[in-house]
Amino acid sequence: MKSGSIAIVGMGVTHQGRALGTLDVDLRRQALELALADAGLQRDAIDGYIHASHEREDLRYLGLSPNFSWPVQTGGATAPSSFIMAAGAILSGQAEMVACAYGMAPSSGGMPGFGGKTSFGSLSYGYPARVGMIGAASAHALHARWHMDHYGTTSRHLGAVAVQLRNHALHRTDAITYGQPITIEDHQASAMVVDPFRMLDCCRDTDGGAVFLLTSAERARSLPGIHPIYIHGAGTGHNIGNWHRRDVYSHHDDIAPAAARAFAQAGLTLDDIDTAQFYDPFTISIIMQLEHYGFCKPGQGGPFVADGGIALDGRIPANTGGGQISGFYAAGFTPIIEAMKQLRGQSGPTQVKDAEFALVSGHGLNGGVQNTWSHATLILGAQP
Amino acid sequence: MSIDTIAPLIKADPDAPFWEAWTSDQRFLLHRCGICGRHDWPATCCQTHGMSAMEWVDTPGAGVIDTFTIFHRAYIKELASEVPYTVAVVRLDEGPYFHTRLVGIAPDAVKSGMRVCIRTGAGDAFPLFVPE
């Protein structure tokens, strides 16, 4: 993809919170209407639809009539992957304006996780469930234990991540932990869930919708009164390579190929990135991604965060909305939403001054015995 | 909600020979490429030599703990009486990872790098590992 050739011209984000009691399809409808208003467009402008999940009720209920409707489900990498698919549709002439849509209500009981109509079966890791390995926290705890044993990372390093994310979120009215500070002692006293993770190492499910409208940079120029953000680079990596190499737990998906492609497309280096928004379901995710993207040396992610490395005045301000752990969990859209806000200057009390380029990651999907599955990287910019 | 509901063993799938050998006489099989000798588990196509050379072979069922986690919370009711319990990823001596429950050792005594081997003679429905 040529740097800056695709523009994000509309962003619609509903209220994100616990047990809202709203149907997931209504969350998508509400988000769509917010995105259309943001872009100054009507429904008939949308000629492509990508749903970050799968079902067949959306187009009718959302009042859309596109040329295609593609379901995509690759876990936490779904959101950035849907942007890559949208770019492909636009650049191959299949659509001019693609809506990438998300809306889930897991904390209202919409995604039990064990299987069934609306579930991805996300809590069962296949055979390991036979011995009681259940839930994404345990899958990531295996990485955390590996990191501790090999690098000397401590529970207090994990706690430093939790406290830093909360320090971002407590100033943000769009975070579920707004106004609720925590200390490292609070982290150390919180209940052990799956060792080494305590309760405060884990994010919680929240309900919410998000819709983004993507088009060509050329078309974006013809739209009046909008605030477009541009895709400068994108890349993907897959954990199956680590599985075949028998080196799963030192990695957090296969970040290297995703990052290499995204930065090469953008013609940028880490020094050009003003803020990073990582997919962060658990505290170890921040530590390992800081290392694998190269913001610090392998094994140094814990001390890096403890020394203020991801604070607003740190080496790389990261997850400035509190991330998934202290902000809200809109799957892979959480980091995209915050990157958009930063690049539009809408992050309020945690705004990074003059943010021009943002790094976004998506991570996840339950890969059974292989642990996690997919990774995607986006580099977004305030200018084409 | 039971473990059988969320993770049924499907006897007809490509891993069936592994489960049949384990449940019938507690043999621990791995899937091996007859050309390059690489072992894998679960059933895997050799990336170099394809599927035709793959065969199920007997192995001792031993290795080292690569990483582990201790469950302090029961995600389903039938596990409530078992917490805390240890789920470990064993790096088998032949190379593949194998996820299992560690038994015969207190969770707080488990260390990465410990040698462990399969427990036989206990009638385990799933291969469980003990310190060697």
Image (cartoon, grey):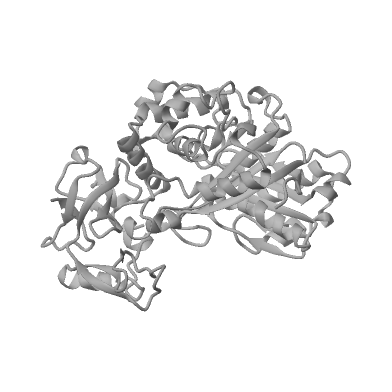
Position of B46 with respect to A88 (left or right) is left
Position of A216 with respect to A108 (left or right) is right
The one of A84 and A328 positioned closer to us in this rendering:
A84
Q: Residue at the far left: name it.
A: B121
The one of A231 and B18 positioned closer to us in this rendering:
A231
Regarding residue A124, the answer to whether it shows in the image is: no
- Residue A66: percent from left, percent from top: 77, 62
Q: Residue at the far bottom: name it.
A: B52
Q: Which image quadrant: the C terminus of chain A?
A: top right
Q: How many marks?
A: 0
- Residue A167: percent from left, percent from top: 53, 23
- Residue B100: percent from left, percent from top: 26, 54
Instruction: Find residue A328 and report its image quarter.
Output: top right
- Residue B40: percent from left, percent from top: 32, 64
Regarding residue A367, the answer to whether it shows in the image is: yes
The one of A15 and B95 positioned closer to us in this rendering:
B95
Residue under the image location 57 percent in, 28 percent down: A316
The one of B59 and B69 positioned closer to us in this rendering:
B59
Residue under the image location 49 percent in, 58 percent down: A120
Position of B76 with respect to A14 (left or right) is left
Residue under the image location 60 percent in, 60 percent down: A54
From what the image shows, is residue B107 above or below residue A102? above
